[in-house]
Structures are given as structure tokens and as C-alpha cells.
Image: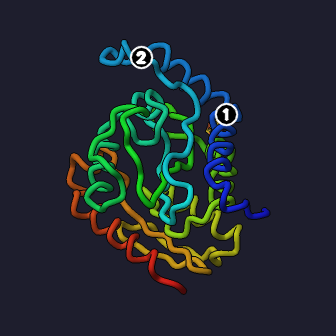
Amino acid sequence: MTKIDPTNDQSAWNALNTEIENCESCPRLIEYCSQVAQKKRKSYLEHDYWGKPVPNFGNPRSEVLLVGLAPAAHGANRTGRMFTGDRSGDFLFAALHRAGMCNQTESFDNQDGLILQGCAITAICHCAPPQNKPDRTELSNCRPWLEETLDRFRFRVFIALGAMAWNSMLQVAKQNNWHDGSSAKFAHGAELHFAPSRWLIGSYHPSQQNTFTGRLTPEMLDQVLIRANQMKTENQ
Ligand code: SF4
């Protein structure tokens, strides 16, 4: 695809996000997001839920892209911003703040003043799925949004939050001839060089399942972010 005019990164980003927000390719997920938004969780009855596909978030001119799985039903599906409004986001944004990659430690809603510095966040599925599990068709439907995000902008250090994000990145990298597609297993801290000058790094997802059990500690996530920032200066 033709590269966009770099002076128009923000407008291209906004345009892509509008397309994502209006996507209706997965009837099950669109229905689920909307139902959750109407029913609401007791503690959020006063909130206006977003209830539709959640767009990319962050600085489109940055080099680091975090790739998550999918919005949480009462997190990003409520607030309309990736990782905002749930415990996963609390853990992630605190780490990004320690790494100098955002301006505040907490995130509540999409008007809380949070600004990502030198990074952006996307997901392999932009709609909240039941039980946090998109099916194969839904992941496949959503892949073009990941492809567009990679194709239209200049991200070159990718942090895959979890094995599913890692595998999706491998597929897109193979498609783009950045990588030969040979099996490269996901692990926390695993690194993979994509030609030219692109890198993939694996991290356990900051889900409560991982952070409450100590599978992912703040220090472990800090190490990944430090490494991602180092990779920005590497040219191979
Ligand atoms: S999951 Fe992705 S492809 Fe499916 S409706 Fe949501 S935005 Fe569209």
C-alpha cells in the first residue's frame, strides 16, 4: 500500500480509527458489545458505555506499538479507549509511566488527560468478546485493521501482549515479507528480528489472571519496556 504523507499521520490515524469504530463485520461481537453497554455492571450504572469497536490509541508517529488481545467488556468497551477502566490497564499504564511512555499512572476514561509518549496501543480484536475469547473467524475479520495499522504508519518495535497477539504479528510479518514465518515460540521476553529494522518482543498479557498470580510482575513488564526502548535505537 502507498505510504501516507507523514505530515498527515494524525488525520490518517483518525480516519483509520473512524473506520474501525464503524466496523460491523462480526455480528456476534457487535451484538455482545451493545448488550453489555445496555445492561451494564451494577457499579457502572451511571456510565455511558461505548459499546462498539474500540479504536487504536496513542501517538501515530511513534515507533513502539503494543498489541493487545481485545477490549474488556466493562473496561475498554465501557470507556472506548484501549486498556482504560480496568485492572489490566492500571497495571499497564503504571508500567508505561515508569518507562516514560505516558504522562500519568492511572486511566479512568477517555477524557482523563492520559497521553502516550512514543507509543501506541492496538489489539488483534477491536470488539469485546464473550469470555474474552474471539473465535477464529472474528480474529480473521479483524486482522485487516492490524494490517492497516502496520502498513499506514511507521511502528517498528512491536510488543505482543500474550501468545495470541504474538502469533497474529507473526502472520502479518510473514505476509509483509518481514519474516520467513518459521516457528518462533511466544515467551515472556522473547525477541524476534523482522527485516528491515523491525522487532517483535513478547510479554505476558497484563490480565488479572497473570498479575494477581505473579506470573507477570511489574519488574517483568518494566524489563520488556526497557528493551523495547533500546530496540528503537538499533538499526539492522
Ligand atoms: S472484531 Fe474487528 S472485524 Fe469484528 S466487528 Fe469488531 S472491529 Fe470489526
Residue 144: give its label. none
Give SS at disc 2: loop
User: Of 158 and 18, which appears nearest the observer?
Assistant: 18
Q: Residue 94 location in percent, x, y?
A: 27, 50
Q: Residue at x 49, y 19 (%)?
A: 37
Give the Cα distance between marks 1 and 2: 21 Å
Instruction: Answer with the quarter of the image where residue 198 lies.
Output: bottom right
Q: Is residue 199 visible in this depiction of the protein?
A: yes
Q: Is mark 1 within 8 Å of ligand 1?
A: yes
Examine the image and state in which quarter residue 114 appears. Answer: top left
* Residue 178, image x, y percentages: 64, 75
Mark 1 residue crowding within 10 angstroms, few (<14) / some (14–19) / many (20+): some
In this picture, is 202 found above or below 212? Answer: below
Residue 135 falls left or right of residue 224: right
**Residue at 44% in and 67% down:** 186
Image mark count: 2
Q: Which residue is mark 1?
A: 26
The residue located at (32%, 14%) in the rendering is: 42
Quarter of the figure that contains the C terminus: bottom right
Q: Identify the secondary structure beneath mark 1.
A: loop
Examine the rendering and report whether any part of residue 162 can be seen.
no
Q: Residue at x 65, y 78 (%)?
A: 180
Specify the label residue 40 is tagged with.
2
Q: Give the mark nearest the N terminus, 1 or 2.
A: 1
Between residues 108 and 28, which one lies in front from this camera angle? 108
- Image location (x, y in percent) of residue 119: 46, 58
**Percent x, y for residue 25?**
71, 35
Residue at the far front: name it: 7
Task: Rate crowding at label 2 as few (under 14), some (14 to 19) or many (20 or more) other CA atoms within 10 Å.
Answer: some
